[in-house]
Image: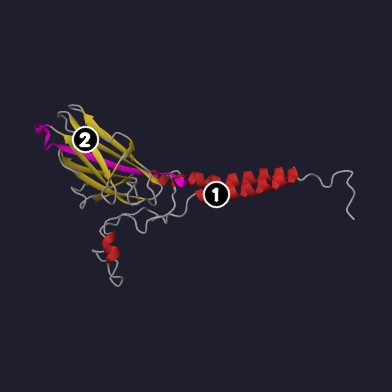
Amino acid sequence: MRAIRVLGVALLTLGLAAAPAVADSSPSPEASGDSAGPTRAGTSFRTATEVEQGQTATARASTGDYLYWSFPADAGQRPTVQATVKLPESHAAETWQIDVYDGLRRRQACQYGAQTRKAAADTPSVELECVLRTVRAWSEPWANDPLPGTYYVRLTALRLSPADLGQAVDAELRVESKDMGGAAAVDGTLSEPLVPGIAARTASDPADDDDSPTAVLADLEPEDGWTSGWWSDRWIWTAAGGALAALAGVAGYRLTRGSGRPRGVPPTA
């Protein structure tokens, strides 16, 4: 009975210790708060406007333009890209789409969300959403898994009538992420995140100044820096499982060994 009581106390202690790790996996109020972002968009991958997660970027453009933004995403995050386009008062039916590309400019599929949406004639606005797969810390070279680094968003209209080309539109973009925790952790990590300029930085002479404009082409990175890729709350559950297994072994031994020498058995000489 004493071993069972000890086991119960250990379970309660481990549950209290693991609770903060589960709570930490949800976005903090500060991370989800709205903040002003850039007021323009790029026209290509090289001129994509940098946007931090949690910011709302705006841009005024013409129908038919390609609008590009970029944002950082780290391992364990599941980014959600939301875009809203305010259309002219009078227009024909239009189809809008957002595409998301990783640091290698590979198009990433959306788990769910209205990535492509058709706006009926004279509709005031259209809303798009793309929920990406969870960013992995490491992947096989042949796989198309999302990896840590810079991600690009392209917003454009697919099918337009000639009369609607060139009309002014207002676009808004917002990127947020959910921390998936240790359930999405994998063994291994990238040596460097997939960000623009990493090849130039890696191949540069170590004696050169790292602050030179040719070494790094983008300053985007998560607020707390890029993760090392080895720590996750899965370590806590692994340690808790080992402790529980040890306690279960002790309790089983106490329950099965009996109270000592059976009655009627004479002591040994």
The amino acid type found where label 1 is placed reads: Thr
Q: Which mark is residue 52?
A: none
Instruction: Decide which of tag 2 and tag 1 comes sooner along the chain.
Output: 2
Residue 77 percent coordinates (x, y): 39, 46
Residue 27 percent coordinates (x, y): 42, 44
> For this view, does 159 lie left or right of residue 257?
left
Q: Is residue 148 magenta?
A: no
Residue 38 shows in the view? no
- Which residue corresponds to mark 2? 96
Residue 57 percent coordinates (x, y): 27, 44
Q: Nearer the viewer, mark 2 or mark 1?
A: 1
Residue 101 shows in the view? yes
| Tag 1 secondary structure | helix
- Tell me the residue at 27%/67% (across/down): 204
Q: Which residues are magenta?
A: 161-182
Q: Residues within 10 Å of mark 2 (few under 14, many from 20)?
A: many
Residue 227 percent coordinates (x, y): 41, 55
Q: Is residue 164 magenta?
A: yes
Q: Where the C terminus falls, by quadrant?
A: bottom right
Q: How is the image coloured?
A: secondary structure
The amino acid type found where label 2 is placed reads: Trp
**Which image quarter: residue 54?**
top left
> For this view, does 193 lie left or right of residue 232?
left
Nearer to the camera, 60 or 267: 267
- Tell me the residue at 45%/55% (across/down): 230
> For this view, does 102 lie left or right of residue 160?
right
